[in-house]
Amino acid sequence: MWFLEFLKAFGAKFVEELKIGDIGEEINHGILQWKHYFMIGDVKAVITDAIIVSWIAIALMILLLHFLTKGINKKPNTRQTLVWLLVDLILDTCAGFGMTREQGEKVAPMIMSIGAVIMGCNVISVFKISPPAKNIAFPAALALVAMVYVIVTSLKFVGVKGFVKYMTNPMPALLPFKILDFIIKPISLTLRLFGNVFGAFVFMEFLYIVIPAILPGIVGLWFDIIDGMIQAVVFSYLTMSYIGEIVEAANEPEDLEKKEKKLKKKALKLAKKNKENPESLKATV
């Protein structure tokens, strides 16, 4: 008898879940963020679900990274190999953007931290928890931090002179556009992350309302996990590219000088070899 009662209760609950109510209202309820106000002395402070979830995600990522990096041995295990491959990938990417190995090693910790925070905050939605990036303040804050880091790190790598070279390269008339570029880049980072996460969140809410069984779980593997990881990689990749862009532009005159010196040395060697045949030297040059 108890089993029949269980089946009836389960069936009633299942049918209730399948019923489609006011879709707009339910999605709107899912989008709205939770807020709580409290007083710190005479100051009114606010805490939102984005703040709470982001700190939970960061704590989980710290535990995961601690698990991956603990017990480092001369003979690397699977966890250690995975971390080494990730670090090498970041260093190789930095080198591809014109940074030296030393510069890449200085940039890698921050890039990995940014990627880990975004990945944790996005992937947490797989547990039906609202991702912080659906609140535009979260990606905006991340983008602002990333741009400040780009400027400060670039100044450390190339100095004020090198930074000025980048801002006036290839001609000083482009200076206003380069300044505008530093305003557009954080806006672009913000809207890209917010748009992708918010869109995925709304789509998944719609699926849970219309088709609550099986399909949302399958589709969520992409939107909650894969797409969240892709957004973390894209954000980190663009941050590296912005630093590399400045470093490469600042070092371009030095690279040209080095190439000219090499060419001169080759020309001198050829001149010594072709003392007896000047016409051959001119043809070679």
Image (cartoon, helix red, strand yellow):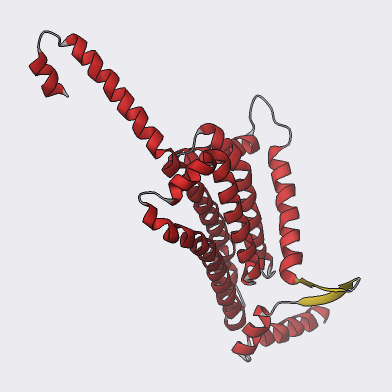
Q: Is residue 219 above or below residue 202?
A: above
Q: Is residue 248 above or below residue 125?
A: above
Is residue 166 found left or right of 144 in the rendered image?
left
Horizontal and vertical percent for residue 251? Answer: 43, 38
Front residue of 215 and 181: 181
Name of the residue lying farthest toward the top: 276
Is residue 45 found left or right of 147 in the rendered image?
right
Residue drawn at (15%, 11%), measured in percent from left and top?
A: 274
Q: Tell me the quadrant of the picture where the C terminus can be found.
A: top left
Q: Tell me the quadrant of the picture where the N terminus can be found.
A: bottom right
Q: Is residue 112 above or below residue 187?
A: above
| Any part of residue 35 in sight | yes
Horizontal and vertical percent for residue 235? Answer: 54, 56
Name of the residue lying farthest toward the front: 172
Q: Is residue 32 above or below residue 197?
A: below
Horizontal and vertical percent for residue 173? Answer: 37, 57
Front residue of 256 and 100: 256
Front residue of 259 and 143: 259
Horizontal and vertical percent for residue 101? Answer: 52, 33
Name of the residue lying farthest toward the bottom: 22
| Count of labels in the image | 0
Front residue of 241 and 51: 241
Residue drawn at (65%, 66%), measured in percent from left and top?
A: 138
Residue drawn at (66%, 55%), measured in percent from left and top?
A: 117
| Any part of residue 85 in sight | no
